[in-house]
Image: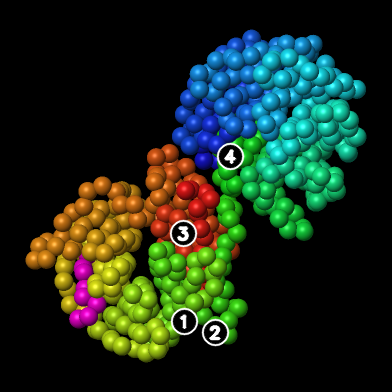
Amino acid sequence: MCFRIVTLGNPIWALTCWKDTIAVGLQSGDIITIDGITGSQIAVFSGHPHWVRSLAFSPDGRSLVSGSYDKTVKLWDIQTGGVVKTFHGHTNWVVSVSVSADCSIIASGSWDKTINLWNIQTGECHHVIEQQDWVYHVRFSPSDPQYLISVSGDKVWHWDINDHKSNPAHNGHHIAFSLDGTQFVSCQGGDIVVQSTDSGAIVTKFHVTHNRTSRCCFSPDGRLIAVAADRTVYVLDITSSNPHLIKTFTGDTWTITSLTFSSPSSLISSSDDKSVKFWQIDTLPTDPVVADPESTSLALGPVKSVTLQAKDGIAISSNSDGMVRTWDISTGLCKGSIQTPAKDPKWSNVQLVNNRLIIVWYADKIYTLDVEKGELLQTVDVTLDNTDGVDDVRISGDGSKVFCLRWRIIQAWSILTGEVVGELCLQLSQPRRFLTVDGSRVWVHSPLSEPLGWDFGIPDSLPVQLSGTPLLHHNGTKQWDIGRSRIKDRITGKVVFQLAGKFANPVVSQWDGRHLVAGYQSGEVLILDFNPMFL
């Protein structure tokens, strides 16, 4: 899915990124930096009189290196946008640049059939590696500042820049390292080959139907490889013994000129059509922890509710057969289960209070159970004129109330008595979807507007409306999108995560800004920790 297109005034042949900063090289000779979150332009670096053909950030993100058809290499200061040094020496176009892991050396490849190694401090070229054909690509290892790979003609070469020795590995037209430097990928025609950096042994290889592959790159976590072929991007999962295609992106009207991952689940591409495109890959950012009912002796019906209690390290699920289970959110293992009297509820909510009671609310009853003994302690009847009109129910964190959203009414019910202890009539024209509860405070969420909240905890008083947006349903600017199984950036509208595959359609889900728990028709419960992605 392409979620943003940034159109520039010139054809683009160079693209690189460092964290949330994207640098784009234009035919005019200018370099534009773009905010990777908002897509807005940050700055313009001017200095090359001719096409910028290659760009590379230094590993510390402080500098940017560019290679141009003007036969020069330039080192730029990211903060000021000024040229720190210009490196002269090539006699033909400079088409590829790379910076060593210790930020001491720049390698530049040129159509003059040489690779120049430049000392960043002195600006001097301390060695020239002669090649027999045009040099298309040079790449330093992200982990070893002495190890360089190049592509000259149709051969991939490995270099130790201390003794400048190399042996050709195999055919290839483009190369890329994994972020940890342990693997590299090369492509030629439709053949994609992943090799071990240390031994050169082939880790895996595969073939795409398109025979004009020209760009390839690893995802930051090493799980995926993206390959550009003419106007198409292929994304492949290489984590199994059988690499397979998981996504194909089409939408460019001209040849893709550069490609890079901006996160484990998003890609950026540039094209001859003067655009930079941002692509969202529908994959999980980390391995999911799946609480699988098939691993136990109890068969579970469809999940009807899930509750996150991250401070206690657990998630709780309830099923249509009345089974309530607690799950360890770090391992996905079941910590305990309890059978309740309820069967086939339309909606429900569960809460573990003081590590002793699970409180379950089904249809027209509130059940309180002793977790340790598995005994029913109390049943409270609740009278509803029309249970079909209920949108959502939530139990307060202290286990004293149930909040019920019905049409345009929020009611607070006592857990002990089932009596209404607070009521609010909403003046809303939009449909409601669900509630978020924190103690005596409750928010109602609408798909088309900001959440609205009230405090029901003031004795002998009507609920008091809360100001500001709660942080209970999102972290910073990230929000779980109502009914769409995805997380969006509230400021930019960018989709930063989406459930896919067998996990695409949960019956119920809950996100607290870091953890996601989702329940499925199959009885499975999915638990994800988004710490590496958002925090």
Q: Residue at x 18, y 64 (%)?
A: 457
Q: Nearer the viewer, mark 3 or mark 2?
A: 3
Dividing the picture into quarters, in which one does residue 241 lie?
bottom right
Tell me whether circle 1 and circle 4 mark residues in contact (CB < 8 Å).
no
Main SS category, magenta section: strand
User: What amino acid type is highlighted by mark number 1?
Assistant: Ser
User: What amino acid type is highlighted by mark number 2?
Assistant: Leu
Q: Reply yes or no: does residue 497 show up in magenta.
A: no
| Label 3 element class | strand
First in sequence, mark 1 or 2: give its number.
2
Q: Position of residue 122 (x, y in %)?
A: 69, 15
Dividing the picture into quarters, in which one does residue 198 lie?
top right
Distance in Å between CA atoms under marks 1 and 4: 42 Å
Q: Nearer the viewer, residue 100 or 491?
A: 100
Q: Is residue 189 left or right of residue 100?
A: right
Tell me whether circle 1 and circle 2 mark residues in contact (CB < 8 Å).
yes
First in sequence, mark 1 or 3: give its number.
1
Q: Nearer the viewer, residue 121 or 309?
A: 121
First in sequence, mark 2 or 4: give its number.
4
Q: Position of residue 526 (x, y in %)?
A: 52, 66
The part of the chain drawn in magenta is 410-417
Distance in Å between CA atoms under marks 3 and 4: 22 Å
The residue tagged 4 is 262
Q: Is residue 69 left or right of residue 481?
A: right
Vertical relation: 425 (above or below) 298:
above
| Label 2 element class | loop
| Label 4 element class | strand
Residue 337: give its label: 1
The residue tagged 2 is 298
First in sequence, mark 3 or 2: give its number.
2
